[in-house]
Amino acid sequence: MDAKILEKNLLELIRRTSSQLPRDVVEVIDKGWRKEKKDSSGKYALEVIRDNIGMAKDKSQPICQDTGAIICYADLPQWCDERLFVKAYEKAVVKATKIGYLRQNSVDSITGENSGTNLGPGNPTFHFHPVKGKSLTVKMMLKGGGSENMACQYSLPDNRIGAGRDLAGVRKCLLDATLNAQGKGCGPGILGVCIGGDRGSGYIAAKETLFRTLDDVNPDKRLAKLEKQILKEANSLGIGPMGFGGQTTLLGVKITHRNRVPASFFVSVAYMCWAFRRNGIVMSEGGKISRWLYES
């Protein structure tokens, strides 16, 4: 694998992820805009969002000034060495930061120093999976700090909200999380949810669900029903875009589950803002991109 070609492709992936929202997200935002009442604050907020989306794409500029934490998932075939990939990706991140596709957004938690390159312990975050196939698949997400601040985790039973250890209790958790996020986290938002797991694996799985498209249907019928129910109920709360009121509080709900130990029952919620920046590529060993995963 030519490292320079890999770096070039990864730089283009970063550019598109930062400046272009996926097709499924744009469609749901447009649908919400059509539903909001004429001359309402909610409709105006979505009009500004739609203008923002169009301008960012046309100018290849970040959709949001907070280009967020850089999260990368890669399915590595035998021909792609993990160390080679990390080196190429980090070079692409540094170049993207210099060009302006990414803001200088990585701060040392002890000293407060900004590296200016977006490199440092834990940033970018990599998740690697070996695969038998011949193609390299890379998915990335840019997750803003405002939305990350609204992530939360419940330990059931939770007497505060009357949530027991069942799907009815999970429902109460998700509506509570939506209510607490109103006006924060740059709504309308998307909930990525994991039922079960431990505290760490639950949050990881919750974020992973955000790689699902908003128009897909959960293969687990129980969770598909719950996703649909939460989306309907959350959008009837009247919170609306940016907390200004209206019918578009959430754009989607994606739920998965993990086994747990009997003593624990966690519900982990990864909140994503309307600037739902994710994209992905499928690439051959020769460096040809055969498919963009979230583009029409």
Image (spheres, rainbow, N blue to C red):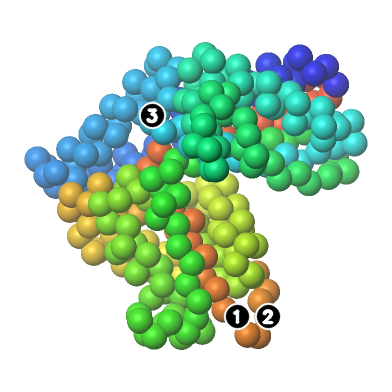
Residue drawn at 65 percent across, 62 percent down: 201
Q: Residue furthest left?
A: 39
Q: CA distance from mark 3 to mark 1?
A: 38 Å
Task: Identify the secondary structure beneath mark 2.
Answer: loop
Residue drawn at 14 percent across, 44 percent down: 41
Q: Quadrant of residue 42?
A: top left
Is residue 225 visible in the rendered image? The answer is no
Residue 207 appears left or right of 32:
right
Q: Which percent across, then down, holds residue 49?
A: 29, 34
Q: Are marks 3 and 1 in contact (CB under 8 Å)?
A: no
Q: Earlier in the sequence, mark 3 or mark 1?
A: 3
- The amino acid marked with disc number 1 is Ser
Mark 3 neighbour density, 10 Å: few (under 14) some (14–19) many (20 or more): few
Residue 183 appears left or right of 119:
left
Question: What residue sits right under mark 2 in the picture?
Answer: 261
> Disc number at residue 264?
1
Is residue 204 visible in the rendered image? The answer is yes
On-image quarter of the N terminus: top right
Question: What residue sits right under mark 3 in the picture?
Answer: 65
Q: Which percent across, then down, holds residue 52?
A: 31, 27
- The amino acid marked with disc number 3 is Gln
Q: Is residue 30 above or below residue 250?
A: above
Residue drawn at 54 percent across, 15 percent down: 98
